[in-house]
Amino acid sequence: MNQLYLFATLAGTRVAVEAREVEAVVKLTDISPVPGMGAHVAGLSALRSRVLTIIDVAALVRGRPTPAEQRGFAIIADISGHSYGLMVDAVYDICQVPEGELPLRGQLDPVWSPYARGLVEHEGQPYLLVSLSGFIEAGAMAQAA
Amino acid sequence: MDELLQEFISETQETLEALAGEVVAWEADPTDRDRLDAIFRFFHTVKGSCGFLNLPRFERLSHAAEDVLAEIRADKRIADPATVSAVLGIMDRIAELAEAVAIGAALPHENDDYLIAALTEKEAAAPEESEAPTAPVAVARTSGGQAAPRTIRLPLSLIDQLMNGVSDMVLARNELSRKLRERSGDPELESAFERLSTCVADMRDAISKTRMQRVDRLFTAIPRMVRDLGRDLGKRIDLTLEGGDVEMDREMVEMVVDPLTHIVRNSIDHGIETPEKRRALGKPETGRLKLEARQSGNQIVIEISDDGQGIDTRRLVDKAIAAGRMTPEAAARMSEAEKLDLIFHPGLSTASEVTAISGRGVGMDVVRANVERIGGVIALDNRPGCGLTIMLRVPLTLTIIPGLIVRAGGLHFAIPRSAVVEILHDNNETLRIAEVGGAKIATIRSIRHSMIDLEEVLGMERIAQPGPRAIMVVRSATGVPFAMGVSAVENHEELVIRPASPLVMATGVYAGMTLPDNGKPMLLLDAAGLANAARLPNIIDDQAARRAEETQEAQGGVEMVSALRFEEYSGERRLLKLSLIERVEDIDARLFGRSGGHGFVRLDGRLVPVANGHHDFAGEKVAALRLRDGAREACYPVAAVLDIVDMPAVPDMVAMHGLLSGVAVIDGEHLEVINPFALFAALPDAPIVERTGGRCLLADSEDGWTREILAPLLRQAGHEVVMGLPGDAAVDPQDVVLFTGSEASEASELLGCRVVHLRATPRPNGPQDSSIYRYDQDALMAALSGSRR
């Protein structure tokens, strides 16, 4: 169970993402907005010749869009053939966690319950294990609603 | 796996795919040697290859098939449907084996002997079956020979990688180009860069072509499927495939395969009736099924039509009611189109029982969902009892389309060029925008369109701008044209369209995205989606179109006529109907004079009255309008000729006084309109001083040359021209009769006036010939003036 995880803060919460879901982490530059979309889609951004759909995860989770000047980094992921960038507050580290995924404990904030799959402990701190594709699916649901 | 083996497997699989159609076609026409040879060659190759690859089962199967085909080639045996089925069976088994080898699974242990026996066994059974010599499926392929160009196989990921690489290269080139422009121009460097640019552009074109695939590939599996289904259900089907050479995006092909297969299956299962039933209905026993692909703008249209029984909408409605989906009252209110639309509702089918073919849990609802997911549209043309046509329209995404770049709310968007019918500025005179109850209606040349503002539909802020906004008339593939307001239409570009992520596509207003050279992603607008998002009524305003003509007639009052705008010596600007003005010329000021209270000007040896009485001019030359009311002419000196404008035939303000008939407002300027009636009425009645001479009577008024060439010439020279000889013999001795024939000469001499005879040949016909060559203008004029003395 020597899993590799990426640790980041996302909407003010410590999260862990399985490293195999992550393609890269980039600093966000220009984002072209997509009018007519909910706040959870921040816009499109070009990464070389690829076009990323930038997801404002904070808006998705907490319903509060991230102000443009606070946009920092994005985790790039390829989900079902499309490239996405998921906005995060900060990225710390990529580490192996020998014990791997732990079951959820405690009373989880309901806004996180659709996304949290479990816990990952790193340097004595618990991190919520989230799946990137979960955010995209939730984004699609938010769209349909 | 062994590379050699892998190559063999993929090659076999590919050939099999291509051959399936060929076998069916060969069955329809067993005399087709080329197809037979192609199939024979396939088995021969497989047999040869597996010999040294040590694949004994492949070898046995292909060997048996090769033997049978060799016999057919040698005319020792005929290709009856049973044999073809057996050959197809062997091909299927080879495909299964190849698949198993490819994924490294254990070879399925089924009895190959049975298949091989089926091949040989039928030799005995063949004569019995000869009562059904017709093949169940006749395939007509209107395009495509068998000669395939040389190809190689490449993994898709490599092509995608190449595509991305080239896109990156284009971006790098653009950056380089910007940097180069900033620095001083070195022509050598620039020409080298230019060369690089061209190479990159060519390469991008070539790479994007690798994404395209012929629709043929979509069709390859169809003949086989139709044949098998036809046999299973005991139906005869005549299949026609058209437009296989149309190219569409490879990914699109893959997306369309499933819906298409399903539609074809439905058509055979539920659409086309059994031969017995068809005979009873008076239809040909063989059902017709036609698949046609064509490109229409930025869409591929795939049409599947059959001549089966169509969709029984009544039964659909009954089923929907029975399933509790709707009340009978609601059903009674539905239009035929709405009833037909029920076929797309999940769980509703006209099939009375679920058969083995269609009972797969996939309905038309899934087909529609699949087509719409790729931005396509599905449309039905139902002819109950006569057939059904299903039209799939799928976009050519990921391809290059010509697009317009528009700006709205400070952002740029692309829209396919083909969707735009017309672009106007909102200050255009032919456009009227009215607003009622929040709805905007744009009336363009008396056709009313629903109007939306792009900013409003997309929920953006409308930015105030100094210039006029652009109004585009947009037409989607299915919908009704509507007007869309944007800040500006900026550019026209070839765009490489890629699919946007499902999240973005879910808005329904975008058809894709593109990454232009500036590196800022841009969204491609979907015209139909915009209309949907704005919930525009889908009603064609054809009444307005029909009424447009009537209104045009009714509006005769504001009919526009061309008018010359000029400036008088007094400084006023006035208008005069253009049709009255023969020409505008500069006349020597000295030619103007005054006599008996009237101004006149000497022109071409005649005195022409001056309409506005001016006769004293400062300059040497005077700009003058030469007017003619048909018989009389007049000269109208003006200070300056300005331009030609459209004025209402009836002036905006009618004020009949003196020379003016009223005031017209042109471009916000009030202009007096000259009343031509008053103008000519004010001219002195009697010709001034010099009598201009007699009339020219043109005897041959029916003659084209006389009418079109001679008459204008004489008029221009100031002669009064009368067509034909006056019947009342009111001939003045000063009149001259001109004729081209010979008959009229005596008659006109009797009239007692001079006669000029014109001839068509340059040379006189004889010494007695006093006629004048008709193009000898000097002689003609001399003869006319001589006649006056």
Image (spheres, coloured by chain):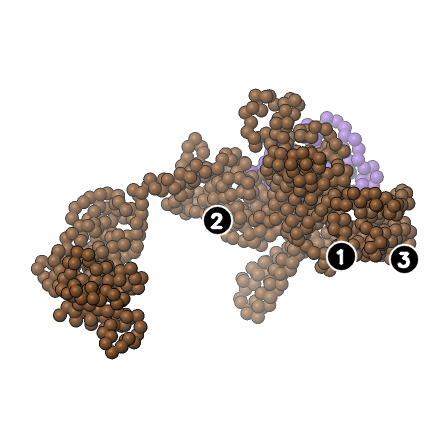
Chain colours: A purple, B brown
Q: Residue at x 18, y 53 (%)?
A: B680
Residue at mark 2 to residue at mark 1: CA–CA distance: 56 Å
**Residue type (three-letter) at the residue carrying disc 3:** Phe
- The x and y percentages for residue B13 are 79, 50
- The x and y percentages for residue B722 are 21, 59
In this rendering, does residue B57 appear at all? yes
Residue contact between numbered discs 1 and 3, judged by CB atoms under 8 Å: no
Disc 1: host chain: B
Answer yes or no: are tags 3 and 2 on the same subunit.
Answer: yes
Q: Pointer 2: what residue?
A: B489
Q: Residue at x 61, y 47 (%)?
A: B300
Q: Indicate which label's residue lies in the foreground, 3 or 2.
A: 3
Residue contact between numbered discs 2 and 1, judged by CB atoms under 8 Å: no
**Residue type (three-letter) at the residue carrying disc 2:** Val
Q: Pointer 1: what residue?
A: B34
Q: Indicate which label's residue lies in the foreground, 1 or 3.
A: 1
Disc 3: host chain: B
Q: Does dot 1 land on a helix, a strand or a loop?
A: helix
Frontmost residue, B41 versus B35? B35
**Residue type (three-letter) at the residue carrying disc 1:** Asp
Q: Earlier in the sequence, mark 1 or mark 3?
A: 1
Residue B474 higher or lower than B582, as above or below? above
Q: Earlier in the sequence, mark 2 or mark 1?
A: 1
Q: Pointer 3: what residue?
A: B52
- The x and y percentages for residue B683 are 14, 55
Q: Residue at x 30, y 49 (%)?
A: B561
Q: Does dot 2 land on a helix, a strand or a loop?
A: strand
Frontmost residue, B732 versus A106? B732
Answer yes or no: are tags 2 and 1 on the same subunit.
Answer: yes
